Image (cartoon, rainbow, N blue to C red):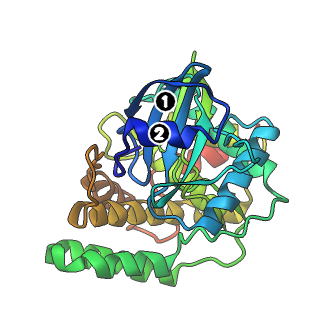
Amino acid sequence: MSVYSVITLTQLEQFLTQYSLGEVIHFEGIQEGVENTNYRVTTTTGTVILTIFESLNKADLSHILQLLQYLKEHSLCCPSPFLDKSANTLLALNTKQAAIFNWILGGIVVNPSVKHCYEVGLQLGKLHQLTQDYHFPVDSHYDWVDWTLRFNLVKDQLSLIDQKLIYDELVFQKNNAVVGLPVGVIHGDLFKDNVLFLDDKVSGLLDFYSAGTGVLLMDIAIAVNDWCLNESSEGLDDTKLRALLSAYETLRPLSLIELDYLPIALRAAALRFWLSRLELKYFPRDGVMIQKKDPLLFRQLLDKHRSIQAVEIGSYSFNLLDSYVKVRSVM
C-alpha cells in the first residue's frame, strides 16, 4: 500500500532479529493502497509483508490483528500476522507500530468478470457469517457524522455545484436513515485492489484496516459500487450485481428491509468514498510512493444513483434490484 515511512536495510535487519525469518535477501516498497506503508521482504526462509501502520492507534490495531488471526483460523483467505520470538504480533519500528504478515499468491483484477463478482460476494458472505457472534470493539465510523466531518474539511476546496450536491445528499441520508439494519464486522474497503485472485478464485482478502462494527449492508454497497460497474463505469451492471448478491445470499440471506434500503446504501457508499478521495486529494500525506485515486468516479456514481432514484425515493428504477428480487423469489 503506499510508502510513507522509508526504512533502511539496517533498520529492517534489526527489526527482523525479533523474528525467526532468516536473513534479508531483498526488500521493496509496494505502491497499492493508501493508508499504510507496506514492503515486500524476501528472506532466506521465504517472502513476507512488512506493514508499518501510519495512523491507527495501538489498541485498535491489536483488535484488528486478533480479528485476522481468528479469520485465518476459520479458513477465510486473508493475511495472518506472524508471532515474534516473544509471541507478539505488534512491534515498534522507529516511532511507529509494525507487523509481519504472510505473503499471499495471486493478482489484482482490474476489469472483473461476472465470475469474479460471484467470488467476491461469496467471500464477503463468508466474512459476515464467520463473525456473526464475534465481538469486535472497533467502530466502523461509516455514518452521517463521519461524512459531515469530511465534508466540512474539504468543502472550501469545492465548486458551489459540488458543495450543493454533497449537502443535498447529506440531508437525504439523514432523513432516510434506517434503524435496525443488521450489524456486525465489516471489512469497510473491499475494493478491487484489496482482493487477490488465483485461477479465478479469491486467494486473499487484504487491508482490513478500515474494518469495524457497522451495518453489514454498507459493506455490500461498498463492494457493489466498485466490483459491479458496467464497462462505461457510469452505473451498475445487472449481471454482475446479481452474481455478487446471489453468491452472498448462499451464506447470509438478506432481509426485505435490507433489499429495500440497498439503493440508499449505494448512495451512502458513493458519497463516503467521494469525500475520502477528495480529502486525500486536497490534503495529501507525504511519502515516496503514493497511490492517488480519482474522486471523480464516485461523484459520477453518486450522480447516477441519485438520478435513478429521482422519480420516487426508495424505489430503485434501474431495474437492477427489482429484477434481482424477482429472480431471487423464484430460486
Task: Using a 10 Å C-alpha cutoff, classify the residue at mark 1 as few (fewer than 14 neighbours), some (14 to 19) or many (20 or more).
Answer: some
Rendered location of residue 305, percent (x, y): 39, 59
Q: CA distance from mark 2 to mark 1?
A: 9 Å
| Res 20 visible | yes
Q: Determine which residue is flagged by label 1.
A: 41
The residue closer to the viewer here, 26 or 167, is 26
Q: Residue 47: give x, y in percent of width and height.
A: 55, 24
* Image location of residue 326, percent across then percent down: 66, 45
Three-letter amino acid code at the position of disc 1 = Val
CB atoms at circles 2 and 1 under 8 Å apart? Answer: yes
Which of 163 and 178 lies nearest the eye of the viewer?
A: 163
Residue position for label 2: 12
Nearer the viewer's eye, disc 2 or disc 1? Answer: 2
Q: Is residue 92 left or right of residue 179?
A: left
Looking at the figure, which quarter contains the N terminus?
top left
Residue 31: image location, x then y, percent: 35, 39
**Which of disc 1 and disc 2 is earlier in sequence?**
2
- In the image, 172 versus 10, the foreground residue is 10
**Residue at horizontal 54%, vertical 25%?**
23
**Secondary element at image label 2:** helix
Residue 169's place in the image compared with 38, above or below, is below
Q: Is 113 positioned to the left or the right of 123 in the image? A: left
Identify the secondary structure beneath mark 1. Answer: strand
User: Can residue 319 be seen by looking at this rendering?
Assistant: no
